[in-house]
Image (cartoon, rainbow, N blue to C red):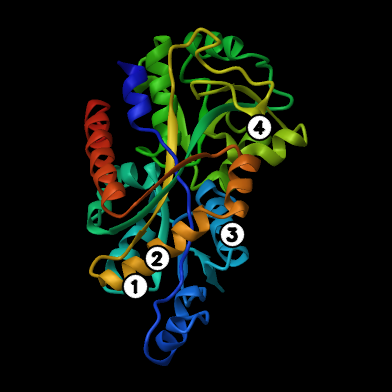
């Protein structure tokens, strides 16, 4: 039951961008066999990241922007950060930009939960779903000089004194980095309300807390720590995927360690409400072109992301399902 719910709350996705449609004299050129506007990169697009530089959303958005450029799906995509309140400051701004077809926001499971726990007036169901991009497993990480060498070491100490063993996450309550340790605590027999969770606004703020031993361990997407893992600054005690991850070869899964839990996060892109069908198509076409490129497939492999691409109505249906699942779980935890 716990495994199924954790899996329901998880999933990742993939991102891309498209070209503007042909018209007028350009359309005449296409009919004669010349390249038209439909072959040109989309322009003037802006992608908001609702948390800090260095976070998982930030890395995803900047990767999307670069691959769009490289694959000629779009040119000059501006990525900017608007952090605050677990992503809901950015969400409110997006909803306020009704009809702005040039703007979109990088988001994921964390924003879904934060909208409830922060009592945001804006919700993900108010936005225009564009594409789910990727899924990413979580990781339980510690600093290189942590006394915890294995997940068993950590769980033993955690069960002995839950309040003393602080866990840090890159999201506010209701986000994936919060839901993961709560699910883990329930699975190993710790009352979730006793967990000492310290929330940070994205992985960019979480990492220094782990490295400085301000928290006993961190729970977040493993992709946020790849550089530090390779540099030997942090150790991964376990990953939360069903199977081992090539990008973190030495880390066992929770299930392999005797803990019956699978948990995955997902990321996607949404636009403001009230955009036109043509504007929506421009984004989805561009994202599809990006997704289909070799450059994007290379990034998936490099970063250990799982391709979970879905667009338009398919993503919209999934988003509604996630919204309800998160609301139900937070209600169970007394947080919504």
| Disc marking residue 247 | 4
Which mark, by number, is residue 73? Answer: none
Residue 101 numbered mark, or none: 1
Mark nearest the camera among 4 and 3 is 3
Instruction: Name the residue rendered at 45%, 64% in the picture.
Output: 286
Count residues near mark 2 (Cα–Cα under 10 Å), then give few for <14, some for 14-19, many for 20+: many
- Front of the two marks 1 and 3: 3
Marks 1 and 4 in Cβ contact (< 8 Å): no
Query: Do the numbered discs 1 and 3 sit on residues whose CB atoms are within 8 Å?
Result: no
Mark 1 or mark 4, earlier in chain = 1
> Considering the numbered disc 4 on the image, is that residue within a helix, a strand or a loop?
helix
| Residue in the image at 57% along x and 68% along y | 72
Disc 3 is placed on an element classified as helix
**Label 2 close to label 4 by CB (< 8 Å):** no
At 59% from the left and 39% from the top, the residue drawn is: 223
Mark 1 vs mark 3, CA separation in Å: 20 Å
Q: CA distance from mark 3 to mark 2?
A: 14 Å
In this view, the residue farthest toward the right is 231
Query: Does 275 appear above or below 179?
Result: below
Q: Nearer the viewer, residue 68 or 146?
A: 68
Distance from disc 4 to disc 3, alpha carbons, whole Å, reads 20 Å
Gap in angstroms between the C-alphas marked 1 and 4:
36 Å
Quadrant (top left, top right, bottom left, bottom right) of the N terminus? top left
SS type, badge 1:
loop
Pointer 2 residue: 283
Q: Which one is earlier in the sequence, the residue at label 2 or at label 4?
A: 4
The residue lying toward the viewer, choosing from 229 and 46, is 46
Whether residue 49 is visible to the viewer of this picture, yes or no, is no
Q: Position of residue 47 (x, y in %)?
A: 46, 65
> Which residue is labeled 3 in the image?
67
Instruction: Estimate the spatial distance between the alpha carbons at disc 1 and disc 2, rounded to whole Å.
Output: 8 Å
């Amino acid at each position: 039951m716990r495994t199924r719910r954790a899996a329901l709350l998880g999933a990742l996705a993939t991102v891309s961008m498209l070209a503007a449609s042909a018209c007028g004299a350009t359309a005449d050129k296409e009919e004669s066999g010349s390249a038209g506007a439909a072959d040109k990169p989309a322009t003037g697009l802006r992608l908001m990241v609702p948390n800090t530089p260095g976070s998982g959303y930030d890395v995803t958005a900047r990767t999307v922007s670069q691959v769009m450029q490289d694959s000629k799906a779009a040119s000059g995509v501006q990525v900017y950060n608007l952090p605050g309140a677990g992503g809901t400051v950015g969400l409110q701004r997006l909803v306020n930009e009704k009809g702005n077809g040039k703007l979109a926001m990088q988001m994921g499971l964390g924003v879904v939960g934060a909208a409830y726990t922060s009592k945001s007036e804006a919700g993900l169901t108010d936005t225009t779903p564009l594409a789910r991009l990727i899924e990413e497993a979580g990781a339980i990480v510690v600093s290189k000089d942590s006394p915890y060498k294995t997940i068993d070491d950590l769980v033993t100490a955690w069960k002995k004194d839950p309040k003393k063993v602080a866990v840090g996450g890159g999201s506010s309550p209701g986000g994936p980095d919060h839901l993961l340790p709560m699910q883990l605590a329930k699975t190993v027999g710790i009352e979730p309300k006793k967990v000492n969770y310290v929330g940070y606004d994205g992985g960019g703020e979480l990492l220094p807390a782990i490295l400085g031993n301000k928290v006993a361990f961190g729970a977040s997407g493993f992709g946020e720590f790849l550089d530090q893992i390779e540099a030997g600054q942090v150790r991964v005690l376990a990953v939360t995927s069903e199977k081992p991850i090539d990008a973190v070869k030495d880390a066992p899964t929770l299930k392999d360690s005797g803990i019956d839990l699978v948990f995955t996060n997902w990321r996607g892109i949404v636009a403001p409400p009230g955009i036109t069908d043509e504007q929506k198509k421009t984004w989805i076409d561009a994202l599809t072109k990006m997704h289909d490129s070799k450059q994007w497939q290379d990034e998936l492999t490099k970063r250990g992301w799982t391709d979970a691409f879905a667009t338009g109505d398919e993503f919209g249906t999934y988003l509604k399902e996630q919204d309800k699942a998160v609301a139900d779980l937070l209600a169970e935890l007394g947080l919504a």
